[in-house]
Image (spheres, helix red, strand yellow):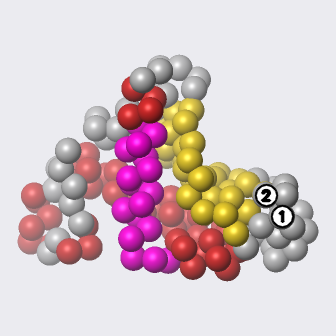
Amino acid sequence: MIKYDIKKISSKNIRMIPRKMENFSEELNSVISKMKDRISREVPDRGYFRNFAEDFENNNKNIFARAISLSVEKDENIEGSALLLVSALHPSMNIDASSMLVCGKRDEILKFMNKDNFIGKVAEEIYKLSDSLKKV
């Protein structure tokens, strides 16, 4: 598989990126942006909040999944703590695979999401989940 660092490619070299990969990157960036916004608004320092998710249909043929989702769930064991998860849905069955990206308070999760390599980590986890769905 070909991996591209979208941040380091100049606009005149953009034609080198396969269109499917560009769409996937745009979708992933959009979902991450929405999640950052929702986490800052909806996850309190203390108390109850509803679990929520942002997802998108997968059009990338290199990823064996029908849809990709980022979700935030309340950590039942630690007050004011949440889990940031990534999930992939099997293309033909109602089976999903998920992986925890980070667990912590709202500010810790946002700090983790603002790191430069966060998008790369999410993409790496998606490919791992895709591989695990192929074995089902």
| Residue 42 sits in quarter | bottom right
Residue located beneath label 2 in the image: 75
Q: Is residue 107 left or right of residue 127?
A: right
Residue 30 percent location from the top left of the image? 46, 62
Q: Residue 83 in the image: state x and y as whole percent.
A: 68, 59
Which of the pair 132/15 is nearer the observer?
132
| Secondary structure type for disc 1 | loop
Q: Which residues are magenta?
A: 114-130
**Which residue is situated farthest in the front direction here?**
77
Q: Amino acid at mark 1?
A: Ile
Q: Secondary structure at mark 2?
A: loop
Q: Main secondary structure of the magenta part?
A: helix
Label 1: how many residues lie within 10 Å, few (<14), some (14-19) or many (20+)? few
Q: Which residue in the protein does label 1 denote?
A: 78
Q: CA distance from mark 2 to mark 1?
A: 6 Å
Magenta stretch containing residue 116, yes or no? yes
Tell me: 25 left or right of 33. Answer: left
Residue at 26 percent of width and 50 percent of height: 21
Q: What is the residue that sits farthest to the right in this orientation? A: 47
The answer to whether mark 2 and mark 1 are in CB contact below 8 A is yes
Q: Nearer the viewer, residue 92 or 135?
A: 135
Q: Is residue 27 visible?
A: no
Residue under the image location 59 percent in, 70 percent down: 36
At label 2, the amino acid type is Asp
Query: Which of these two is toward me, 16 or 85?
Result: 85
Determine whether 62 is above or below 126 in the image.
above
